[in-house]
């Protein structure tokens, strides 16, 4: 089901902000339909945004308290501009609203009329992009993943999971999942936890949106069911 018709009057107005701390993860995603051709980006002593390597490693460090302990993300494979941070962001959307900007590979959580928490993301590859308004119909922690029939047709190797793949580090949905709905129906699209740092800042999925596991846990904890989600045109 393709989402359509929604727009958000929003724009980022400042690139300065402070990042907040949390935990980490590792796991390849079945939602990726093509190989990544992106080279690794090395970090020096600090990022271009002034975040030290030690701070970044702490932000994306291990999360041993999870049901399935999450290892640290390899931040050397992530462009520092995709690290979580608070930014100036003008919008008319209500606080708590999630705004996905696939053109720039960002997800925003609106904090107020002028600021938002910004996360780096992976998004749908060519042919799987969509936009519009939706809402979080349900949430899942270490959820079971069941590939849709359309994916099984495209990728027969996932047919073995037609009955569902239990939660865990190898599960494509990862530690947390927000399921997007329209008019009471599941759209088949999600915002999920990715353990593949190289995917952040790329279009590789079948339309879903992935955040690094530490970022996804941070967003998930602040997002109740019924939260509005706006996906901007790519």
Image (cartoon, helix red, strand yellow):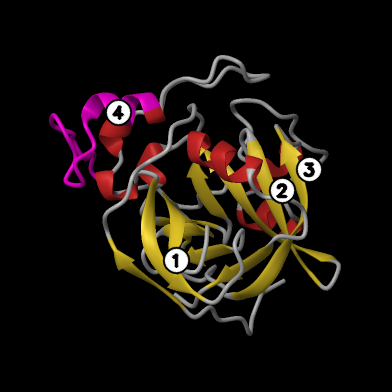
Magenta extent: 38-58
Residue toward you, 158 or 122: 122
Q: Give the residue pinned by disc 3.
A: 162
User: Sequence order check: which comes first, mark 4 or mark 3?
Assistant: 4
Q: Give the residue pinned by disc 4.
A: 55
Q: Secondary structure at mark 2?
A: loop
Q: CA distance from mark 3 to mark 1?
A: 29 Å
Answer whether residue 142 is magenta in the image. no
Residue that appears at 63% across and 85% down: 5
Left or right for 27, reference 142: left
User: Sequence order check: which comes first, mark 2 or mark 1?
Assistant: 1
User: Sequence order check: which comes first, mark 3 or mark 2?
Assistant: 2
Rendered-image quadrant of the C terminus: bottom left
Q: Give the residue pinned by disc 2.
A: 147
Question: Local crowd at mark 4 within 10 Å, few (<14), some, or many (≥20)?
Answer: some
Question: Local crowd at mark 2 within 10 Å, few (<14), some, or many (≥20)?
Answer: many
User: Sequence order check: which comes first, mark 2 or mark 4?
Assistant: 4
Give yes or no for contact between labels 2 and 1 (Cβ–Cβ under 8 Å): no
Residue 33, given in percent of the width and then of the height, sits at: 50, 52
Residue 56 location, quadrant? top left
Give yes or no for contact between labels 4 and 3 (Cβ–Cβ under 8 Å): no
Rendered-image quadrant of the N terminus: bottom right
Give yes or no for contact between labels 3 and 1 (Cβ–Cβ under 8 Å): no
Q: Nearer the viewer, mark 3 or mark 1?
A: 1
Residue that appears at 49% across and 78% down: 233
Q: CA distance from mark 4 to mark 3?
A: 41 Å
Q: CA distance from mark 2 to mark 4?
A: 37 Å
Residue toward you, 198 or 133: 133
Question: Local crowd at mark 3 within 10 Å, few (<14), some, or many (≥20)?
Answer: few
Q: Give the residue pinned by disc 1.
A: 102
Q: Is residue 185 above or below residue 198?
A: below
Left or right for 204, reference 172: left
């Amino acid at each position: 089901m393709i989402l359509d018709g929604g727009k958000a009057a929003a724009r980022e107005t400042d690139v300065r902000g402070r990042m907040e701390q949390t935990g980490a993860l590792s796991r390849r995603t079945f939602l990726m339909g093509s190989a990544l051709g992106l080279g690794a980006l090395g970090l020096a002593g600090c990022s271009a945004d002034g975040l030290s390597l030690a701070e970044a490693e702490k932000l994306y460090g291990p999360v041993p308290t999870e049901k399935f302990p999450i290892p640290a993300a390899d931040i050397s494979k992530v462009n520092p501009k995709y690290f979580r941070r608070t930014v100036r962001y003008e919008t008319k959307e209500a606080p708590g609203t999630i705004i996905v900007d696939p053109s720039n590979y960002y997800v925003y959580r609106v904090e107020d009329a002028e600021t938002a928490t910004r996360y780096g993301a992976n998004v749908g590859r060519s042919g799987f992009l969509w936009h519009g308004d939706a809402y979080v119909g349900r949430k899942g922690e270490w959820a079971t993943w069941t590939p849709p029939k359309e994916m099984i047709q495209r990728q027969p190797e996932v047919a073995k999971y037609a009955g569902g793949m239990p939660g865990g580090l190898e599960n494509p949905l990862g530690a947390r999942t927000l399921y997007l709905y329209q008019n009471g129906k599941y759209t088949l699209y999600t915002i999920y936890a990715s353990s593949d740092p190289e995917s952040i800042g790329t279009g590789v999925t079948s339309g879903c949106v992935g955040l690094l596991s530490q970022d996804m846990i941070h967003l998930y904890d602040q997002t109740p069911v019924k939260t509005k989600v706006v996906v901007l045109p790519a």
